[in-house]
Image (cartoon, rainbow, N blue to C red):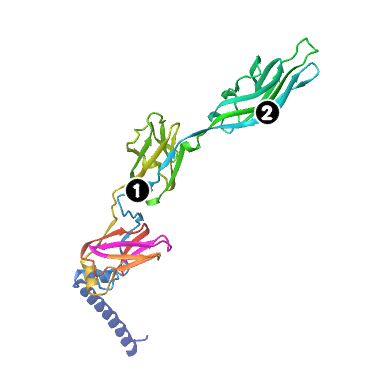
Amino acid sequence: MKFPTMDGKQKAQSGTGAAVLVVIIAALIVLYILFLPPADREAILEGRDGTGVSANTTLLLESPGRLDYLPQKDVEHVLPSVNLYSTTNALLLESSPTAFIKNAWLDKSFKSLNFTVDDPANTKNILLSFSIRSFQGRLIVLLNGHEIYNSEITSLVMPPIELPQHLLREQNYLEIQVSGVGAAFWRTNFYDLENIKITADITDVSTREAKLSFVVTETERNNVVRAKLKFFPDCDPLIAGVLKVYINNHEIYSSVPDCGVLRPLEFSPHYLLNGENVLLFTTDRGAYLVDNINLKSELKEVTFPTFYFTLDQEAFDALLAGSRNVVMHLEFSNDVDMKKAEVFINGHLRGFDTREVSYSLVLNPFVRKGNNVIEIKPKTTLDIVNIRVVAE
């Protein structure tokens, strides 16, 4: 039987003493923490450094998006005056110096003329005229396959033959014939013609309409709430026709206006387009001088975005102690457009003017304990991806 040696007893007593020391130290630490001020106790338990606010704490994070810059309450587009009128001219459509038309049993010869009419609807008083040197038989005229004249001629002088407007096409075919001899096979019916002409009165209606172009910016288009147009029609009321006004193919006016009286009207702002817009004036007859043309977009009331964040007592104390900074970070959509704005921090004005994709500002001199407010007033249209306020 072996008994413990003196060295073994000493080792056991040493281990027991170390364990007791650890327990005592732990108890003292617990007591120390319990008697600390609440703020310091929370800082230790939460792993903070005792300044009252964690590093890189986000106090505000928002995504403002597009902020429009509206330097005025309305946008005016002053447009030049326009003239609306039509002109009618007598034009020669086709001619032939001579023609000998005959019709016999075994010998026939007719005269054909081809002519073009660009605008049949505005071509009137279409006439076939000629001089007759000699003749025998009935004269027959066909237009586009339709017989329009078939009659005996009693004189060498005859009035022009009118061609029906409703038979006109853009490409037309006219044929001059003479009647057959019937059973008198030995005879020949004929017409000896000269100076053959087809004439018409053609009205040029291209000057009855006028187009004006103007540009609407994206900011104007997105913020317009009322759209107004006014113009001064100078015209003769005895011959004035219906005046029509279109904005981007939308009819906004159709009437015979009071000549010499300024005409205001309002139309839907939805008719306006981002970019180029077209204003069209047109009339069916008469003449107009449309002057003092003014188109106005009334814009909605602008509200500037406002953001709030809170600094509690501990965070504010950390700022005063110089151990923390409060920094505002703005992130933009690109680094190409110029960004300008005024920034108000609790009423204190600061501004930026940059092309960079981000902008940062230390807010320490302007912040206060409790609620804080940031207001952004753009001086150019801004696309802000996010605004972030961080305790760093």
Which residue is nearer to you in this view: 320 or 294? 294
Is disc 1 placed on a helix, strand or loop? Answer: strand
Answer left or right for 249 relative to 18: right
- Disc 2 marks which residue? 113
Residue at image position (22%, 77%) is: 28
- Residue 84 seen: yes
- Disc 1 marks which residue? 76
Q: Position of residue 41 (x, y in %)?
A: 23, 70
Disc with the residue nearer the chain's start (1 vs 2): 1
Which residue is nearer to you in this view: 3 or 183? 183
Q: Are marks 1 and 2 in contact (CB under 8 Å)?
A: no
Most common secondary structure along the magenta stretch: strand
Answer left or right for 311 relative to 95: left
Q: Position of residue 237 (x, y in %)?
A: 37, 30
- Reply yes or no: does residue 336 show up in magenta: yes
Answer left or right for 80 relative to 205: left
Quadrant (top left, top right, bottom left, bottom right) of the N terminus: bottom left
Q: Nearer the viewer, mark 1 or mark 2?
A: 2
Q: Check disc 1 and give the amino acid type.
A: Glu
**Residue span colored magenta:** 328-349
Marks 1 and 2, how far apart in space? 57 Å
Q: Is disc 2 surrounded by few (<14), some (14 to 19) or many (20+) residues within 10 Å?
A: some
Residue at image position (43%, 40%) is: 83
Q: Check disc 2 and give the amino acid type.
A: Leu
